[in-house]
Amino acid sequence: MLVDSHCHLDRLDLTPYSGDFSGVIEHAHAAGLGRMLCVSINLADYVAMRQLVEAWMEIDVSVGVHPNEGETAAATEAELLALGADPRVVAIGETGLDYHWQDCPVAVQQERFRAHIRAARALQKPLIVHCRDASEDTLRILREENAGSVGGVFHCFTGDWAEASQALDQNFLISFSGIVTFKNARVLQDVARRVPRDRYLIETDAPYLAPAPMRGKPNYPAYVAHVADFIAGLQGVSVARVAEESAANYYDLFKPRH
Ligand code: NI
């Protein structure tokens, strides 16, 4: 069974499915997916996202505000606690720091990140961390807030092995998206070869970042099969093994209750 550990199901292009969301899920099942984690980007869209996936118990959800969301997309610890208490919510995020785009002032990003970590600790649910050009501050804030006590995942990881080691040391898993399949991703491919077998996940981040051979096209959860296939090739193991291990790692981390 394949698991897509990170996708944005409320943002997919449904044109190829005649606007029918259930077509996306059928396509995912046909590709061997048994579970998906639908990740929240802001609280304004959260209720609609949660309703969209309500009928599919194999879809877990997270609640949080993406670091690229502007200053007005606030999330207090109290709001996160209220929404995060839902049993379908298996994680808090995506949260973190993005110094590449800086759509939101750094100080605001950091404060919002800390609120997410505190909520995750209070709820005892893991964190989904987005980190771009900000690894030093991300790792420092995780340490200062004792985020390792709940752990989580560095999603769509793009760093090198030194950075991966520090994330692993703080009780975080490494998740590989379609970026690992890109020709220029040598440093990241090295991380995929070295990561411990019980410490990695795979994801699509759909609708973004479609893996080769779909690069540049709209992305869907079904394409996580291409990520699994590519990682199996890098590691010299069967794709079935990558599917099984990454699925087991997903259940260990997120502990879905149903
Ligand atoms: Ni994402």
Image (cartoon, rainbow, N blue to C red):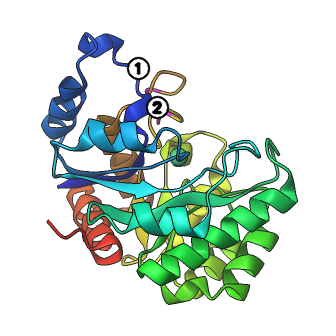
Count of numbered circles on the image: 2
Q: Relative to residue 231, is residue 185 drawn left or right?
A: right
Q: Is residue 212 above or below residue 41?
A: above
Q: Are marks 2 and 1 in contact (CB under 8 Å)?
A: yes
Residue type highlighted by circle 2: Pro
Residue matched to label 2: 207
Q: Residues within 10 Å of mark 2 (few under 14, many from 20)?
A: some
Q: Is residue 256 above or below residue 66?
A: below
Identify the secondary structure beneath mark 1: loop
Q: Is mark 1 within 8 Å of ligand 1?
A: no
Q: In x, y percent, where is residue 52?
A: 28, 36
Q: Quadrant of residue 53?
A: top left
Considering the image in quadrants, where does the C terminus appear?
bottom left
Q: What's the mark number on residue 13?
A: 1
Q: Relative to residue 64, is residue 10 drawn left or right?
A: left
Q: Is mark 2 within 8 Å of ligand 1?
A: no
Closest to the observer: 60 or 200? 60
**Could you tell me if residue 151 is visible in this image?**
no
The part of the chain drawn in magenta is: 210-214
Q: In x, y percent, where is residue 214?
A: 44, 26
Please report whichever mark, 2 or 1, sits nearer to the chain's N-terminal start. Answer: 1
Q: Residue at x 33, y 45 (%)?
A: 50
Closest to the observer: 135 or 92? 92
Q: Residues within 10 Å of mark 1 (few under 14, many from 20)?
A: some
Closest to the observer: 245 or 132? 132
Q: Relative to residue 36, is residue 188 drawn left or right?
A: right
Q: In x, y percent, where is residue 74?
A: 66, 52
Q: Residue at x 74, y 42 (%)?
A: 70
